[in-house]
């Protein structure tokens, strides 16, 4: 969003990128070509209207999301070190002087699977040398390292040592709360790093830092379990997909990474295994239709059915819950939850648009319940945080109504109220 | 943050700004000169290290914060209208099709006083014409209008009509929850706008939209009370400040606004009245020192003392609470809260840096309590949301310790725990 960001501007000029517009830069073109190979491998028609520009959007998101490789901490810090008399010895002039910057929302890309993960970053430091760093620069420095292919512990260490080196305070501490998407929601991990006076985590300084963060540090997640796709059964993607693997390798190269780096060797196959779950399969739902006498019918609800899907515009996951309401006649068995779940799963696991998924679920269930059905999907879209707009905390709700729900406000209201109660 | 944002890029190229770097553009220079006049009027030394580059930072923040004047909804929307069969009549193909995008965090600048205010934006629409708008574009469109001098109701109407015109759905609804800074915290206002099927706010569609937002719409704030500086006694800024008024007028011009527009006529004087509260006055604190016998002393705390201050790096407010802890001997009266409050107020109301303010409060109170004092300041900085990094929800805590608190961990811990309890 930062049109006037001098620092980025300089980086671009230095690297000569302004010689070619973004669309024509070889890295952009390489990623686009690779994405086309992947889309074809997923049985998609790459000329379909909705995904025609997906390769370009993916290239833009990925290059933007890894721009940290071209950035230097020094460039952000140098102009924002402010002299502050009274903070001139190692203990901030004897006043302690601990400064804590809390709750900086960032995202990074997982080096093991290429999915974006959320990072809530907290930094503590004790100024020294009679100067303080402008508050916004802590976020800038975190971003330099977050906008790369990462894993949480290294990210914490790089932010910490970057600040230690260029700000030269008497100590820096970093706490990151990270969330990695997985089918059941998120894998959470909290990592820490400290330098100078914060080297020993049992020290008084750490103790104060943590008490100002106002949360208890939990270390119950092993970092080995961090990326859920690493521990999944590691059977190889079939040989038929070697072209797709080569495509992902070329993406890694275009981002400025070395695909033979130890941590990245299995990344292409992991990424593809995840993507393959969203293949455009033609699977005929076998639903058991049943007759229904139009007697007095009551509202039945299946709420909070979890789903995962893949935004076809950015090849980034969106996830959330689906709620289904319908009218069920007397003497008729309501739909089994497992049936509704399988319909949700079927329409979720493909390249999708939330609006379409909602409608498809409604249209598929409609004949099973004599036409009266309402479907609400509520989702968070990774593409809303891991691209230019970076809107943390936003969510999208979509509604599809058929039959009686189209015209009967009280029926809709009753259903929407029942959703709120179940949360 | 969006180095690769093609749309912004194009706007810049179209306006020929790349002919001159940002620093040398006449608008940037005009704002910088005006800020120098204002700083001098506040009795500041404009060559002081901490504020030397403040004019540049203010110019950057203001131009960035009002870039919406140069943006067009059309440019963001056109490339992101995706064909979606099944949503082709006025009621989204008969499936209702309401789409709700919730909790988009933005900020805007108040046209009455030039302070940034927070905007939580929610949009609902019913697609038509067989196409949907990419979700991130709702945020982009909101930004086009938020990044101008605004007031909440007009902002809501402009977002609504911008979407209606360029997306052509069967209806659009916008709800904005806005927070304007004031001395006692914030003035909150919720505003709405609707078009097409959402024109009537008592309609079924609105009802559904609101139930998916999951909050009750409150209309208990009159929009006339919105900007607290409008209703303040409107005595004129003294004639001596006519040069400062002219400076603010030149800022409005540089942002592309017409200073004679009805809503902007009093803006310069309101802005200056607010700024004058943060003048660098030399006021000698008259504190009543008293002797203290060094007997058994107990920890006294004054917590949650509200303060407002002005970040000297960006001339943007930061606000929060100060907590003070000290040891008070037997038989000695503890400090009166009003005394602590006046010290906090004195060091708050000036161009400041949070680290310095915390230290100054500690050093000022220290002789009153025989040297043992701890001060914690917790604040939100407007400059963290209303500039390039836009980190909503982040906060900063600073600590200053003197005397016994420097060496006695258990004393510090006891105090920090007592803070947590009082929240």
Image (cartoon, coloured by chain):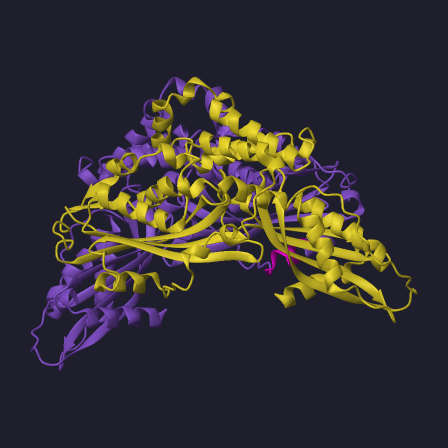
Chain colours: A purple, B yellow
Q: Quadrant of the N terminus of chain B?
A: top left
Q: Is residue A278 above or below residue A3?
A: below
In percent of width and height, residue B344 lies at 70, 54
Camera sees residue A198: no
In percent of width and height, residue A386 lies at 40, 43
Camera sees residue B157: yes
Residue found at x 50% / y 30%: B250
Q: Quadrant of the C terminus of chain B?
A: bottom right
Q: Is residue B21 left or right of residue B212?
A: right
Q: Is residue B417 left or right of residue A330?
A: right
In percent of width and height, residue B293 lies at 92, 65
Residue A210 included in the magenta stretch of the image: yes
Residue B368 included in the magenta stretch of the image: no
Front residue of this view, candidates B31 and A137: B31
Residue found at x 47% / y 54%: B179
Residue found at x 30% / y 69%: A419
What span is colored magenta in the figure?
Answer: A209-216
Front residue of this view, candidates B231 and A153: B231
In percent of width and height, residue A109 lies at 44, 42
Q: Main secondary structure of the magenta part?
A: helix
Q: Is residue A372 above or below residue A215?
A: below
Front residue of this view, candidates B91 and B237: B237
């Amino acid at each position: 969003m930062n049109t006037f960001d001098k620092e980025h501007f300089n980086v671009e000029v230095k690297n000569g990128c302004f010689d070619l517009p973004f669309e024509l830069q070889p890295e952009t073109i390489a990623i686009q070509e690779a994405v086309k190979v992947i889309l074809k491998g997923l049985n998609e028609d790459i000329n379909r209207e909705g995904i025609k520009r997906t390769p370009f959007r993916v290239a833009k998101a990925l290059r933007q999301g890894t721009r940290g490789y071209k950035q230097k901490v020094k460039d952000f810090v140098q102009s924002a070190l402010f002299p502050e008399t009274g903070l001139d010895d190692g203990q901030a002039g004897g006043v302690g002087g601990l400064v804590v910057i809390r709750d900086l929302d960032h995202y990074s890309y997982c080096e093991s699977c290429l999915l974006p993960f959320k990072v809530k970053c907290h930094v503590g430091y004790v100024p020294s040398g009679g100067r303080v760093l402008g508050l916004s620069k802590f976020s800038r420095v975190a971003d330099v390292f977050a906008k790369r292919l990462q894993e949480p512990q290294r990210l914490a260490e790089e932010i910490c040592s970057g600040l230690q080196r260029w700000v030269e305070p008497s100590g820096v501490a970093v706490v990151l709360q990270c969330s990695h998407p997985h089918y059941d929601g998120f894998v959470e991990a909290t990592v820490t790093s400290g330098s100078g006076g914060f080297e020993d985590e049992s020290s008084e300084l750490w103790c104060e830092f943590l008490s100002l963060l106002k949360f208890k540090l939990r270390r119950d997640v092993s970092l080995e379990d961090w990326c859920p796709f690493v521990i999944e059964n590691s059977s190889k993607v079939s040989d038929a997909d070697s072209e797709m693997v080569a495509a992902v390798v070329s993406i890694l190269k275009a981002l400025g990474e070395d695909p033979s780096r130890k941590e990245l060797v299995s990344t292409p196959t992991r990424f593809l295994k995840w993507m393959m779950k969203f293949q455009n399969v033609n699977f005929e739902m076998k639903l058991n239709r049943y007759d229904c006498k139009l007697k007095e019918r009551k509202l039945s609800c299946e709420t909070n059915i979890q789903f995962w899907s893949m935004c076809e515009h950015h090849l980034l996951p969106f996830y959330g819950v689906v709620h289904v309401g319908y009218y069920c006649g007397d003497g008729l068995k309501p739909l089994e939850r497992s049936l509704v779940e399988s319909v949700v799963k079927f329409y979720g696991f493909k390249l999708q648009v939330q609006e379409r998924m909602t409608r498809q679920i409604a249209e598929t269930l409609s004949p099973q319940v004599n036409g009266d059905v309402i479907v609400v999907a509520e989702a968070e879209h990774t593409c809303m945080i891991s691209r230019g707009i970076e809107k943390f905390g936003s969510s999208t709700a979509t509604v599809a109504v058929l039959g009686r729900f189209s015209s009967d406000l009280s029926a809709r209201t009753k259903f929407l109220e029942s959703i709120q109660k179940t949360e």
